């Protein structure tokens, strides 16, 4: 068993910031990530399709930290899954990782995932998330299609539209499901968000220069096609498209935190269920910290701050003495984090899907993609008395596929809230057990 001072699960902005901060102070650090390269979706290859002025301060800072990470003695375990834990001991599955790592302290920085509410035809080839399409362009230089329709809510739509247009792609239209009034809540924060305003203005200049139609459309989308996407119905409009890119914000990846036995709170405008943490990112479990999107959806700037905060707190817990400038830095990080959280609440509120996506569900719409469970089956289960996600799981196999409920869980929470007369706070996430992600049977055998 490998022993380290600090293990960090997730090498996105929060994990990278935590690893660099801890390694600078002499801690033995292990950084674990499922991807072949550190940086997460935000910091990995943000560049080939985006000019320098389209990256923002958070990404610039993140890339500086990523470069420093390569010069520090951090044990980096790539393409490695942390599939179980007990206390601060992790079970791992990877090509070069040990089967177990025992750490004196653990930072969980497992990020978030995009949220798309179900709609007719959303499983057709050609329908993808905004982030998936952006990654196709950034990492592989491939456009998601020839005739692209972009829909949903939030800044990812604007960034993707600019990337497509700057790579000579065709954007048929941008269908924004947010309410313009929702963005008015950000007005008190404008003075502290100059870099993001400049970034948004740059995206809109690109869209305006191409005369891309920008429409506020809150109706439920319908994707149609015979085996692949051919058309999208949006209200009274029909678009002939071979690619529909859609997204409504993010949800936190909390499975390892659940497995660790951490307490949770429900924060609707930070993504839903998130770990109960203090201002130093400590959970209620000894020596376990949470940072980044898994502690509340808020973007790269918030994640970088939280990764550094968690590493400083973990170091203090392990006996690393803070210098005077560290104390000053700590107070600044906490203040800045609160600012980012205020903005995150505004952004997540604006990105919520219209109620019609749940109110107008039809029986044939697939809710659980892994097990092909349709809304009509879920409605029957509700009529038979199911009142929880685990109850639906027992009756219908939802949440038992490859994604283990990461896609259908938030969808079913919303359905239960609106159809079964419960509040979102009453609907607990799926119960988790190891392995939290699929691993080879041999790894389970090794773990005994």
Image (spheres, helix red, strand yellow):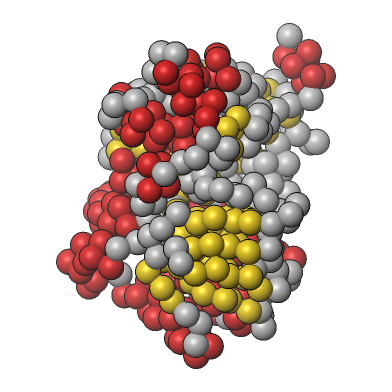
Residue 327 in percent (x, y) is at 28, 49
Q: Residue furthest bottom?
A: 209
Q: How many marks?
A: 0
| The N terminus sits in image quarter | top right
Point 55% across, 14% down: residue: 394
Question: In this rendering, does residue 184 appear at all?
Answer: yes
Query: Above or below — where is 128 with respect to 158?
Result: above
Of 280 and 190, which appears nearest the observer?
190
Q: Residue furthest front?
A: 236
Residue 126 in percent (x, y) is at 68, 58
The quadrant in which residue 52 appears is: bottom right
Residue 356 in percent (x, y) is at 38, 48
Task: Report the side of 149 relative to 411 (left or right).
Answer: right
Point 52% across, 74% down: residue: 173
Task: Report the side of 342 relative to 60 (left or right).
Answer: left
Of 321 and 206, which appears nearest the observer?
206
Point 79% across, 19% down: residue: 441
Question: In this rendering, does residue 63 appear at all?
Answer: no
Query: Above or below — where is 221 with respect to 47?
Result: above
The quadrant in which residue 224 appears is: bottom right
| The C terminus sits in image quarter | top right
Q: Residue furthest top?
A: 448
Query: Above or below — where is 4 with respect to 57?
Result: above
Point 47% across, 37% down: residue: 411
Residue 110 in percent (x, y) is at 53, 40
């Amino acid at each position: 068993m490998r022993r380290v001072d600090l293990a960090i699960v997730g090498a996105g902005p929060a994990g990278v910031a935590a690893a660099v901060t801890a390694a600078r102070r002499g801690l033995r650090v292990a950084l674990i990530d499922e991807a072949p390269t550190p940086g997460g979706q935000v910091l990995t290859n943000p560049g080939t399709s985006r000019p320098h002025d389209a990256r923002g301060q958070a990404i610039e800072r993140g890339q500086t930290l990523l470069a420093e990470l390569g010069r520090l003695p951090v044990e980096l375990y790539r393409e490695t899954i942390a599939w179980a834990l007990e206390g601060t001991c992790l079970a791992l599955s990877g090509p070069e990782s040990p089967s177990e790592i025992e750490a004196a302290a653990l930072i969980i920085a497992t990020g978030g995932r995009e949220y798309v509410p179900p709609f007719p035809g959303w499983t057709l080839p050609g329908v993808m998330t905004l982030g998936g399409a952006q990654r196709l362009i950034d990492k592989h230089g491939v456009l998601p299609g020839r005739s692209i329709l972009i829909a949903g809510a939030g800044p990812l739509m604007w960034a993707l539209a600019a990337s497509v247009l700057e790579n000579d792609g065709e954007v048929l239209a941008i269908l924004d499901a947010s309410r313009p009034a929702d963005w008015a809540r950000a007005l008190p924060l404008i003075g502290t968000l100059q870099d993001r305003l400049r970034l948004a203005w740059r995206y809109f200049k690109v869209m305006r220069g191409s005369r891309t139609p920008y429409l506020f459309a809150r109706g439920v989308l319908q994707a149609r096609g015979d085996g692949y996407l051919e058309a999208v119905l949006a209200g009274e409009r029909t678009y002939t498209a071979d690619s529909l890119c859609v997204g409504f914000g993010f949800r936190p990846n909390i499975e390892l935190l659940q497995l660790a036995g951490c307490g949770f709170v429900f924060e609707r405008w930070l993504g839903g269920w998130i770990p109960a943490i203090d201002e130093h990112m400590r959970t209620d479990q000894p020596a376990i910290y949470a940072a980044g999107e898994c502690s509340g959806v808020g973007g790269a700037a918030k994640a970088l701050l939280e990764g550094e905060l968690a590493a400083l707190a973990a170091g203090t817990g392990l006996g690393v003495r803070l210098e005077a400038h560290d104390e000053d830095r700590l107070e600044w990080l906490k203040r800045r984090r609160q600012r980012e959280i205020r903005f995150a609440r505004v952004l997540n509120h604006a990105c919520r899907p219209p109620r019609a996506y749940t109110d107008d569900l039809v029986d044939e719409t697939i809710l659980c993609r892994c097990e092909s469970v349709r809304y009509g089956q879920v409605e029957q289960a509700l009529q038979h008395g199911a009142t929880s996600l685990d109850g639906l799981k027992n009756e219908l196999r939802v949440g038992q596929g490859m994604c283990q409920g990461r896609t259908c869980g938030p969808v079913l929470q919303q359905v239960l809230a609106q159809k079964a007369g419960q509040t979102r706070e009453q609907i607990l996430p799926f119960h988790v057990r190891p392995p939290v992600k699929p691993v080879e049977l041999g790894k389970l055998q090794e773990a005994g």
